[in-house]
Image: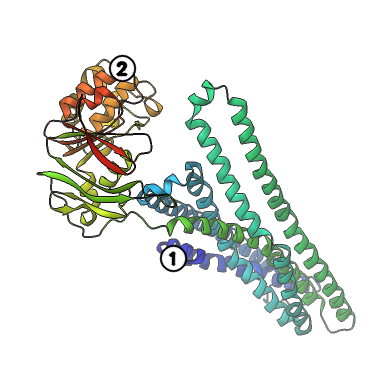
Amino acid sequence: MTPTALLKTHLRPYRSTLVFGMAVMLLEMLATLATPWMAGAFTQTLAGGISKFALDTTGLLALWAALLLVQFAARALSSYLFSVTSARVMVDLSRRVHDHLQILPLAFHQERRTGELLALLSHDVTQISHFVAGPLAGLLPLSILLLGSTAMILYLDPAFGAAVIVLAPVLVILVKLLGRQARPLATAAIREQAQSLAVANETLGMLRLVKAHALEEVRQRAYREQTGVVLGLRRRQLWLQATLTPIVYLVSSLVMLGLLWWAAQRLAAGLLTTPDLVSISLYGLLLIRPISGLGGLYLQLEQARGASQRLLDVLEQQPEPVHVGGVPLPPLRNQIGFRAVSFAYPGRPDLLQSVSLTLSKGETIALTGANGAGKTTLVHLLMRFIEPAAGAIFIDETNIADADLPSLRRQVGYVPQEVLITHATVRENIAFGRVDATEQQVLEAARAAMAHDFICALPEGYDTNVGENGAKLSGGQRQRLALARALLNNPQILILDEATSQIDVAGEAEFIEAARHARAGRAVIVVTHRPAMLALANRVYRLEDGSLTEQAQA
């Protein structure tokens, strides 16, 4: 897909609005083009002649006033229609990008900073929507003015019109030559703006760490340096914008003055009448507007093309391998089987080498091993966050590679090491993965996670807002809230991925008691180094050098 095709796709639903807006613009431009003709006719009546409209001075001025009213009404309506369309395109495009980002594999997000992706939604989408209200809306009236003014001049004086036709392309070439740096500058500015947003996002996301290490000045300096780069590029862009249109306006005005001097000579020679000279002069002034306006349109077009290319780079990324019409996965009945599974991250040696493992329903196993051994990778393969290089994973008789992805993930309750809590109420956090959950289901999940008592002790119970990332809760409380969320769907498979590594002994004890209560009737995988968590398992496996070996329990 090209940037033009991307824009066409999002403009297609609003074709009728755009066509109507262009028709209104056409009406405005016709009224505008009639103004110099009216001026010539008015001059003729002042000279005692009969106007081309067979009207006296009063009638001519009344008609002129009517034309001005038409111009005003048409300009207001067309501006509104194109602005509304611009806003709709911005919303549609931002929704498309937002939705596409969600279905891309985790590997894509792990390679990019969150701030860069946020810049797509905030900056790049806005640039494209501005194209609708700017260059797209301005192209038709400027084209009509250019062609209409030239045609009228050609009608009034063919020699003068021929000179305009010869010189106009020279000015268009001048616009392209002066604006040839527009796209590289726009691309660089968008890229660096995204980087500045990424720096700010990282600072705010690690604010506790920044404060703990007294790094405020370091982060402030990093942000100042990055925004300084943005400012430098923006200054170059603004200088180009500030000079291109005036330069083109100056050159086209000087050219027009030269042509008017020539027209004056033709008037003196009797080859042109005074009313026609007045009309030609005003059409010449109208002609300057579209030619000089080309500079601004060209810059906006290049900026929109740069933003479109960045969006296309993301939209063309392949989403997760969700098989349309995949096998709906029934609830786990017997066991999960890893069969000779191998995996390697791009550009790195094999992390898992022909790993085989069987886990029965109602059983708990623990995975241990050094950091980076591949424990979390193994459970990510089960959830199909990533795909194995070789081998297969089966739930009962179904290869999960052939399964409907949502039906697979609905069977898994996942409690990661880094608990993700939204800035919302306790109830909303528990129901995060199932927004249609009833009050009773939320309460049952909280009780299953042994979180009900501490929730009731909060100032507003289940309606308590827990703050950004659960800042108003203790580590153990956050983990039990995450466990309640995982249990809300009554999953057949429960994964506890280093779930107690960031909480104290008391919090760990509370969580283990909740996990012991919640594991009944489920296949449970515990990824941990902690002895107390290992005690939950029926079997313990150590992952080392890509191989899995069963360990004797203490």
| Rendering coords of residue 142 (x, y %) | 63, 67
The amino acid at mark 2 is Val
The answer to whether residue 204 of the structure is visible from this angle is yes
The amino acid at mark 1 is Arg
Nearer to us: label 2 or label 1 = 2
Answer with mark 2 or mark 1, whichever residue precedes in sequence: 1
Q: Foreground residue, 466 or 215?
A: 215
Q: Which residue is mark 2?
A: 505
Q: Foreground residue, 373 or 477?
A: 373
How many numbered badges does the structure rendering display? 2
Q: Dot 1: what SS?
A: helix
Q: Quadrant of the C terminus?
A: top left
Is 432 located above or below residue 242 in the figure?
above
What number is the disc on residue 381? none
Distance Cα–Cα, label 2 vs label 1: 63 Å
Q: Is residue 342 left or right of residue 57?
A: left
| Rendering coords of residue 41 (x, y %) | 73, 73
Q: Decide: marks 2, 1 in contact (CB < 8 A)? A: no
Sort mark 1 into few (<14), some (14-19) or many (20+) by Cα contacts within 10 Å: few
For the point 54% across and 55% down, the residue is 307
Q: Foreground residue, 223 or 460?
A: 223
Q: Is residue 63 left or right of residue 484?
A: right
For the point 46% across and 47% down, the residue is 111
What number is the disc on residue 15? 1
| Rendering coords of residue 65 (x, y %) | 64, 62
Is 425 located above or below residue 276 in the figure?
above
Q: Foreground residue, 536 or 222?
A: 536
| Rendering coords of residue 192 (x, y %) | 60, 46
Is 401 located above or below residue 466 in the figure?
below
For the point 81% across and 73% down, the residue is 47
Quarter of the view holding residue 34: bottom right
